[in-house]
Image (cartoon, rainbow, N blue to C red):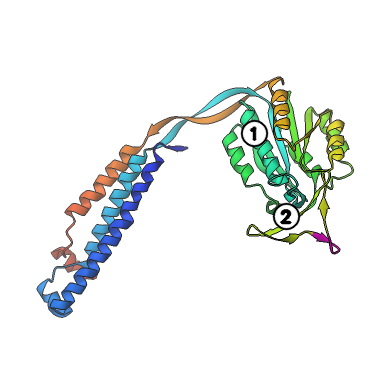
Amino acid sequence: MYQIEEPTYFYYLAIIPTIIVVFLLTFWWKKRAQKRFTDALLLEKLAPNASTFKSVLKLIFLAIGIGFLVISLVNPKMGTKLKTVKREGVDVVFALDVSKSMLAEDIAPNRLEKAKQIISKIIDKLGSDRVGIIIYAGNSYPLLPITTDHAAAKMFLQNANPDMVSSQGTAINEALDLAKTYYNNDEQTNRFLIIISDGEDHQEDTKQVAQNMSKEGIKVYTIGVGTEKGAPIPMKVSGSLIGYKKYKGETVITKRKGDVLEAIANAASGRYIDGNKTEKPVDFIEELIANAQKSEFETKQFSDYKDQFQWFIGLGIFFLLIDVFFLDKKTKWIKKIDLFNEQ
């Protein structure tokens, strides 16, 4: 495991292409100037030891040396010890609906982005709690395994979109079954599953599946996004609207099915929350988790990061010294063995 202490110094790597450009321009200018005074054959006789190959080789050594010195300024650090940290918290798994209906824009900017906002703000409220993310439509997929890395959770969340699932629909049952595999600690007393959806096209036996999860100690809560009035599903290419989804020539209007989501939550002894106002579900979940009994679990992380800049300084100086002492003229012993094919 490694860390970068000063990544801004990477900008200094721009020196290398600048040097290469200057070298090429200078080389071109020299060749042009030489042609004006003499021909190539005479020049070979006047300067028999001149070597283009060595000039290029010196440039390579110079570029490598500068590259290593820049890396030393960045100061990469290596984790040398893996330690176990004990934390207290709960397990929170989000099941995010990424079906096409979530692209409806009856809630700004659209249902899917609203759902992401809610999840992101809930994650911000979590302490040492573990979080996992599942996405589902016609199939369900693990977007992020259970982890304490909240920054990673938010990063993966931003990439969630309908194109990440192979088929459309709303396979909530698959998402519920997948969620069970996320809770790898059977002794965890508080395990939460938060479903965020518009309630469209849920299967008939979803309530039974949710009820079974409740019996296993997993508390299921649902958050609904969208309006009962509904909206068409926009079809876009490269961000530009090209029309709306149609079925048998009629524009499809997708509506939030709050009663479906409420029934799922009730079957699992949970609760349904209206998600159209971001603060409402965020505040509810924050209070819910804050009052939950915390369980102790262990996580492993690298510690004792040590500076590694000295190695890169040494390599940088080594290549720069080679550049300084490496002549750009042919040498007798090299000419004898014709190593660089210069005779």
Magenta segment's dominant SS is strand
| Residue 65 part of the magenta-drawn span | no
What amino acid is at disc 1? Lys
What amino acid is at disc 2? Ser
Q: Earlier in the sequence, mark 1 or mark 2?
A: 1
Residue 330 picture location, percent across and down: 16, 65
Spatial CA distance of label 1 from label 2 is 28 Å
In this view, the mark in front (1 or 2): 1
Q: Which residue is mark 1?
A: 121
Residue 85 picture location, percent across and down: 55, 24
Q: Identify which residue is drawn at 81% across, 60% down.
A: 246
**228 or 217: which is nearer to us?**
228
What mark, if any, has residue 166 been given in the picture?
A: 2
Residue interval drawn in magenta: 246-250
Instruction: Tell me if 209 is positioned left or right of 164 in this view.
Output: right
| Image quarter of residue 157 | top right
| Residue 249 part of the magenta-drawn span | yes
Q: Identify which residue is drawn at 75% across, 47% down.
A: 106
Instruction: Tell me if 291 is positioned left or right of 331 in this view.
Output: right
Instruction: Tell me if 73 is positioned left or right of 335 in this view.
Output: right
Q: Where 171 sits versus 302, above or below?
A: below
**277 or 212: which is nearer to us?**
277
